[in-house]
Image (cartoon, coloured by chain):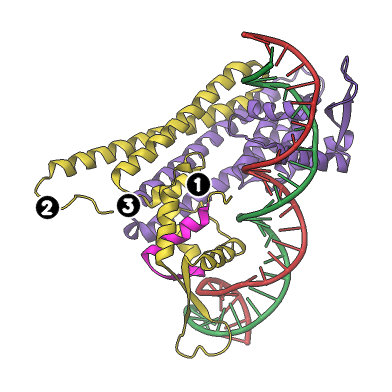
Chain colours: A yellow, B purple, C green, D red
Amino acid sequence: MKQTGILELAVLGLLKERSMHGYELRKQLSAKLGPLWHVSWGSLYPALRRLARQGAVDKVAENGPSRGPGRNKTVYRITAVGEELFDGLLREPGAVPDPELFALKVAFFRYLQPEMRVAMLERRRIYLQDKLAQFKSNLRDYRERIDSYALTLQDHGMAVVEDDIEWIDELISREKSLGAAAVADKSSSTSPTKL
Amino acid sequence: MKQTGILELAVLGLLKERSMHGYELRKQLSAKLGPLWHVSWGSLYPALRRLARQGAVDKVAENGPSRGPGRNKTVYRITAVGEELFDGLLREPGAVPDPELFALKVAFFRYLQPEMRVAMLERRRIYLQDKLAQFKSNLRDYRERIDSYALTLQDHGMAVVEDDIEWIDELISREKSLGAAAVADKSSSTSPTKL
DNA sequence: TTCGTCATGTAATGGGTTACATGATTAC
DNA sequence: GTAATCATGTAACCCATTACATGACGAA
């Protein structure tokens, strides 16, 4: 049972935009997701190999000018299989608890229909609210038995979760107002959003 | 080369307060650190076994009333070796980048001298500020090439880091005012804080 | 009596980190 | 010419997750 496939999703998402070397892939990960993402070679290349084995990416040898023997550059290109795998990973609803995975999916939101976006955001919201409740009940039960350092830790943890919820709410309302605008715009002949 | 030893640190820190079963240990982890910590049995018991092998904890069979054959409860108790290991792990300065490890160390701040606390906080502060700078330079370079979802992701990421810095600043100034109060209080004969 | 929770572990599997190893190209 | 960065991988080690397996105890 494979877990998240988080690196796979990230790689496929980037390769959807354009084919790249492994090396560039790593830089782009930071560019899209911020400096949070430090993918090591020891995890990136094996991941690419796994994807190639599944037929989700092609390895294309890059024949530069005088590139005879020695190290070849390899460009990775997503295949039809890979596109489907990406879609499956992106839609798969298990994202909620893992913040990295959730962030990654948000980064690729444009590949989801608006309703799916809202659904995902609302699932995440519920999860966070539940976590908040756990914090509160936890504090109810243990406040007297923990020292001020553990307490400030939990307070700060709660504040972070609250901020996260606010952010989610913003994203939800932005989606809804976009949706409303699209509905109001009846002049367009085809559906307002592409797959 | 063992990495962080984060679970070890957590376990030893809790066992410093009192001896416990593995089962209770897991609950206490959530109590101290908030619902962030989900330690699975498959990681907790092996960690305890590792600690026992090193001589850092003793396994004490609990002889309850009618507890003859069948499953025995085992109480884990920290040893002198364990106390030293804890101290080493807590003081070891490599904590900075890993948020979980840093949070854990804050939870055990009372076991550090105030100067050490401030030093750790300041190191963390520098790290976070650097991360913030990375976010900014990242956005300078890529803002035009990423879509609004990736952008809001990064903005939110930055806001979280900024909040973290504010929190660290609060902790630092609290430490400093405590230190000043201790210095002003010259009536006590021995040193104001214990090891 | 049966359900929930207390309680302790093992086994398989997967995959991430670190360090190692190599070599080309570009800028100074 | 030499340092930095581009570029691609492998190997060993560690350990976390998941699922499995077992059983006692208290309450309903």
**Range of residues picked out in magenta:** A5-24
Disc 1 packing (10 Å; few <14; some 14–19; many ≥20): some
- Residue A36, horizontal then vertical, whole percent: 51, 51
Q: Nearer the viewer, residue B74 or B87?
A: B74
* Chain designation of label 2: A
Q: Please name the residue shown 49% across and 67% down the image.
A: A55
Q: Looking at the image, is A21 positioned above or below residue B90?
A: below
Q: How many marks?
A: 3
Mark 3 and mark 2 lie on one chain; the one further toward the N terminus is 3
Q: Residue at x 43, y 36 (%)?
A: A124
Residue type at mark 1?
A: Glu
Q: Secondary structure beneath disc 1? A: helix
Q: Are marks 3 and 1 on the same chain?
A: yes
Whole-angstrom CA distance, mark 3 to mark 2, is 21 Å
Query: Please, which chain is the residue tagged with disc 3 on?
Result: A
- Residue B34 position in % (x across, y down): 60, 29
According to the picture, the residue beneath numbered tag 2 turns out to be: A189
Q: Earlier in the sequence, mark 2 or mark 1?
A: 1
Front residue of this view, candidates A16 and A24 = A16
B43 above or below A45? above
Cβ atoms at labels 3 and 2 below 8 Å apart: no
